[in-house]
Amino acid sequence: HADVHPYLRLYLLGLLSARLGDEAAAEGYAVDLDRMGPSSPAPGFVADLGRAVRMEIAWVAGRPSAALAIIEGARLWRAVERDPNTSPLYAHAYERYARAELLYELGRYDEAQRWHQALADELIYAAAPAHLRLAEIYERREELEKSVEHYERFLALWENCDPELQPLLDDASARLARLRRAQSRLR
């Protein structure tokens, strides 16, 4: 993947700039990707990287509907649906996760569930957060057994997480304990 590293660098700088609130810098990286994409070794891939930066800009700015529309227009979905395991880079794991999260944020839980389930099943590096979100979706629907199952998977995958992620683990543990108590009362 050495031939796409320069484009990945611009993409990551764009995402970081967006998250830091520097919309102008992020848009500049997206423009660079647009400009360089057609002559790149992977024009569609590079175009989608620029689109993902623009999605991030909209999402960080509190425009989830716009962010979802931007990323849903990407070419990557056709390639991902054909073979999501072609490459960790070309599988667009972040964009897939972002799409699932945007759907969740917009209250489109059935669609979010499908996307998160695919992440949990296919992508080991995105599985833990996907299981956590699935647990929350099932908890919202009062499907206790499924919720418990996904909390357990999340906790098992992240049992040795980085210290800054520990609050997520603690919260999931508390929710799991509460669900188990509710299950025992129903039996």
Image (cartoon, grey):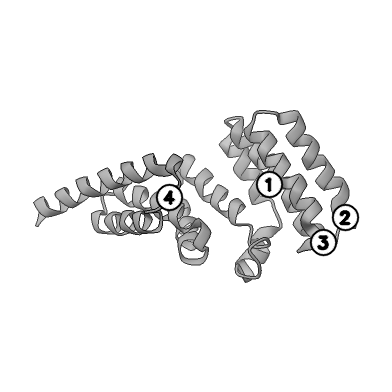
CB of mark 2 within 8 Å of CB of mark 4?
A: no
- Comparing marks 4 and 3, which lies closer to the viewer? 4
Circle 3 Cα neighbour tier, 10 Å, few/some/many (<14 / 14–19 / ≥20): few
Q: Residue at x 43, y 42 (%)?
A: 163
The disc at residue 164 is none
Q: Earlier in the sequence, mark 3 or mark 1?
A: 3
Q: Write down the residue under mark 1.
A: 52
Q: Earlier in the sequence, mark 2 or mark 4?
A: 2
Q: Write down the residue under mark 4.
A: 161
Q: Residue at x 66, y 67 (%)?
A: 87
Q: Amino acid at mark 3?
A: Asp
CB of mark 3 within 8 Å of CB of mark 1?
A: no
The disc at residue 38 is 2
The disc at residue 3 is 3
Secondary structure at badge 3 equals helix
Circle 4 Cα neighbour tier, 10 Å, few/some/many (<14 / 14–19 / ≥20): few
Q: Nearer the viewer, residue 164 or 106?
A: 164
- Comparing marks 3 and 2, which lies closer to the viewer? 3
